[in-house]
Amino acid sequence: MGTNLTHQNSIPEEIKRSLKSGNACYHLMQKILSSRLLSRNLKITIYRTIISPVVLYGCETWSLTLREERKLRVFENMVLRRIFGPRRFEVSGEWRRLHNEELNDLYSSPNIVRVIKSRIMRGSGHVAHMGEDKGCIGSWWGTGGKETTGKPRRRWLDYIRTDLQEVGCRYMDWTGLAQDRDRWRTLVRAVMNLRVP
């Protein structure tokens, strides 16, 4: 399956490739996901164990922008619409697609963006445990490559700090925080379970 890492910390092509593989897997499973013989819980299990891992492979190295987050959510909503099917108006009897808010309410598990952010956090904890002497931290922290004009690119580290701020850990030395494995696991779970639109 492979994953592509670049010195510029640019992952749109990697996400595009993952979504293409996820779409191929989804199209193979379409008939199963729309079958009336299977329960919704079983279809969700199929999504989480067969389709989702194809998209999420190597996501620990990603630094998501809002555009990539939107693409991932669009993919997940497409699959969930297939699983939950359309809704019928009681008065007119017409069928309509489920809105994103309705999908969020029906799908009780964390959305794909939350899962990716928690995996990034979990992966960063492993990197922090390796320490500086392994030579791994420096390659993950910086953007590398040629400097461009305008706003500097956000680094992988910047996304870790943003996620920690979302769960109330501002201005903390996160590498030191990651040394306490139990507390770090709690933060990873908190990042995953944040409800975001």
Image (spheres, grey):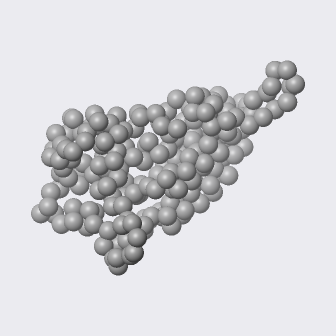
Q: Is residue 55 visible?
A: no
The spot of residue 63 in percent (x, y) is 40, 57
Residue at x 81% of width, y 21% of height = 90
The spot of residue 192 in percent (x, y) is 40, 38
Q: Is residue 95 visible?
A: yes
- Residue lying farthest to the right in this orientation: 92
- Residue lying farthest to the left in this orientation: 133
The spot of residue 121 in percent (x, y) is 32, 47
The spot of residue 65 in percent (x, y) is 46, 56
**In the rendered image of this protein, does residue 2 appear above or below residue 118?**
below
Q: Is residue 66 left or right of residue 27?
A: left
Residue at x 79% of width, y 27% of height = 88
Residue at x 41% of width, y 33% of height = 193
Residue at x 18% of width, y 66% of height = 135
Q: Quadrant of residue 118?
A: top left
Q: Quadrant of residue 186?
A: top left
**In the rendered image of this protein, does residue 40 appear above or below residue 34?**
above
